[in-house]
């Protein structure tokens, strides 16, 4: 009997999302009585680059560090109720992620769980840095680079669909387009063709609405008195009830906080969309200019009318590369005349560093005094009139080499005894920086591979 409706829930919208937030979603999916899927979206550009660095340090690492915290609370319940899981937990090491999930499933009493791995996004062995630079879309960031950390193509939904067709209960991917996590299950469930552009567009739109987790149910939306959403302590993560024609209702588990409304759905629909008439994905070019949204009940919004065009000839790839060093240091001043002492500390640091590292650009903030809207060099501090008896001064700088930034941090620490009265609570840290560039690559340079764990 053909499937006419499926439910897809979102368990996470980024790697640092709330552990345990997926549990009400899974409980609602289990009670729905229709084929159901759960997605976890945990992979941003910088997250993937950090995962590549982790894998270089340890060949068994490189998958999402949030895998256990996000998946463990719901894994057994999903397997028990045949709720199939699709995630990009794999990051730079999908095989290791799949093995970790197998161990978790075995501990939970499901040693025979069928787990599939989707790979093929890693371009580092296929393209040199100069070849990537020749395909760059954002200028000349990659020219002359020899410090590429990660180069990954955005794969589409087809290998996910193939994994589900093969019986996988859990699908682990590396870099795929975020909406593909949803589109793959929909194509599998409804048997859509990979050239049915309107249906692929409809599924991609559903994926786009779910990919950021609770943003569509009130997160990243609330602005008290203007855009209200209740109970962020227990915000409900979203569920899409999708019909075979691609139309959907966006909702959330009963009794959870947040809100699903026309405004939350419209905001998420436009979120990170560069062109509403031509949102490029690996599977389809999505056109939302004719899409319709309608309030279908409390915390229920119907979405329909997406249109699709032939998929792009190329794939997007993101290249992350080393980009010098970033350091920051903070010190506090309290009591009468604290703001004046903070200003003096800034004057001292600028004068000292002008002698020691004259080429280093330093930002200085007195936290709470033009720290949000001041210019990057902190020049607006001179015009600030706010005074406080409890302030914190923050210094920050970046440089291609670590030594100049380390010099700044040392000078801030020296303010303890060589600066204004009453300084305390110095904290400092120095970290390597990563930057990214986008490329367009030929499709045949990224060959997706789907395999079931034996």
Image (spheres, rainbow, N blue to C red):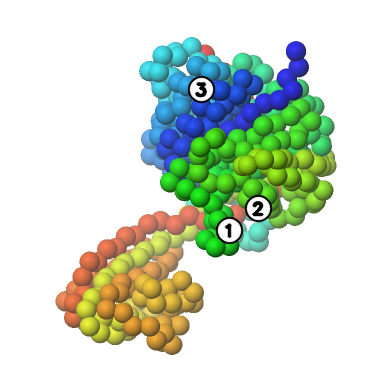
Tag 1–tag 3 contact (CB < 8 Å):
no
Q: SS class of the residue under badge 1?
A: loop
Q: Position of residue 364 (x, y in %)?
A: 38, 75
Tag 1–tag 2 contact (CB < 8 Å):
yes
Q: Position of residue 152 (x, y in %)?
A: 59, 42
- Judge whether residue 284 can be spotted in this image: no
For the residue pair 323 and 251, the one nearer the viewer reads as 251
Q: Residues within 10 Å of mark 3 (few under 14, many from 20)?
A: many
Q: Residues within 10 Å of mark 1 (few under 14, many from 20)?
A: few
Residue matched to label 1: 227
Q: SS class of the residue under badge 3?
A: helix
- Number of the label disc, if any, that sits on residue 263: 2
Is 419 left, or right, of 90 in this rendering? left
Q: Position of residue 92 (x, y in %)?
A: 50, 37
Q: SS class of the residue under badge 2?
A: helix
Q: Is residue 20 above or below residue 223?
A: above
Q: Earlier in the sequence, mark 1 or mark 2?
A: 1
Between marks 2 and 3, how big is the CA–CA gap? Answer: 31 Å
Between marks 1 and 2, how big is the CA–CA gap? Answer: 8 Å
Q: In which quadrant will I find the N terminus?
A: top right
- Number of the label disc, if any, that sits on residue 78: 3
Q: Residue furthest front?
A: 297
Looking at the rendering, which quadrant does residue 403 occupy? bottom left
- Which mark is in front, 1 or 3? 1
Residue at x 52%, y 61% (from the top left corner): 224
Between marks 1 and 3, how big is the CA–CA gap? Answer: 34 Å
């Amino acid at each position: 009997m053909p499937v006419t409706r499926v439910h897809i829930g979102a368990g996470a919208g980024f790697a640092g999302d709330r552990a345990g937030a997926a549990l009400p979603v899974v409980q609602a999916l289990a009670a729905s009585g229709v084929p159901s899927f759960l997605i976890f979206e945990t992979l941003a550009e910088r997250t993937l680059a950090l995962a590549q660095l982790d894998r270089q340090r340890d060949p068994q690492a490189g998958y999402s560090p949030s895998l256990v915290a996000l998946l463990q609370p719901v894994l057994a319940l999903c397997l028990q109720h045949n709720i199939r899981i699709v995630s990009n937990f794999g990051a730079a090491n999908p095989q290791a992620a799949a093995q970790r999930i197998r161990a978790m499933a075995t501990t939970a009493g499901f040693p025979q769980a069928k787990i599939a791995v989707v790979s093929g996004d890693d371009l580092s062995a296929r393209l040199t840095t100069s070849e990537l630079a020749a395909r760059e879309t954002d200028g000349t960031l990659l020219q002359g680079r020899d410090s590429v950390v990660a180069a990954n193509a955005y794969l589409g939904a087809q290998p996910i669909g193939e994994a589900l067709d093969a019986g996988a209960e859990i699908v682990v991917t590396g870099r795929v387009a975020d909406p593909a996590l949803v589109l793959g299950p929909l194509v599998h469930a409804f048997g859509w063709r990979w050239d049915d552009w309107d249906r692929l567009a409809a599924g991609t739109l559903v994926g786009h609405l779910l990919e950021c987790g609770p943003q569509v149910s009130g997160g990243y939306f609330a602005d008290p008195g203007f855009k209200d959403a209740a109970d962020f302590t227990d915000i409900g993560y979203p569920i899409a009830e999708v019909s075979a024609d691609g139309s959907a209702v966006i909702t959330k588990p009963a009794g959870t906080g947040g809100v699903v409304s026309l405004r939350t759905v419209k905001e998420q629909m436009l979120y990170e969309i560069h062109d509403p008439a031509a949102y490029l994905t690996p599977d389809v070019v999505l056109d939302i200019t004719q899409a319709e949204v309608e309030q279908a009940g409390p915390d229920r919004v119907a979405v329909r009318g997406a249109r699709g065009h032939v998929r792009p000839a190329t794939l997007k790839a993101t290249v992350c590369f080393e980009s010098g060093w970033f350091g920051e240091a903070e010190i506090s001043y309290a009591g009468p005349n604290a703001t004046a002492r903070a200003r003096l500390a800034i004057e001292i640091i600028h004068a000292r560093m002008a002698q020691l590292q004259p080429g280093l650009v330093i930002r200085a903030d007195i936290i709470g005094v033009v720290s949000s809207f001041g210019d990057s060099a902190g020049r607006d501090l001179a015009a600030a009139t706010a005074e406080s008896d409890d302030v914190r001064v923050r210094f920050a700088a970046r440089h291609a080499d670590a030594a100049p930034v380390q010099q700044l941090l040392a000078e801030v620490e020296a303010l303890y005894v060589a600066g204004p009265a009453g300084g305390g609570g110095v904290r400092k840290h120095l970290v390597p920086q990563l930057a990214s560039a986008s490329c367009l690559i030929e499709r045949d340079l990224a060959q997706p591979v789907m395999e079931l764990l034996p």
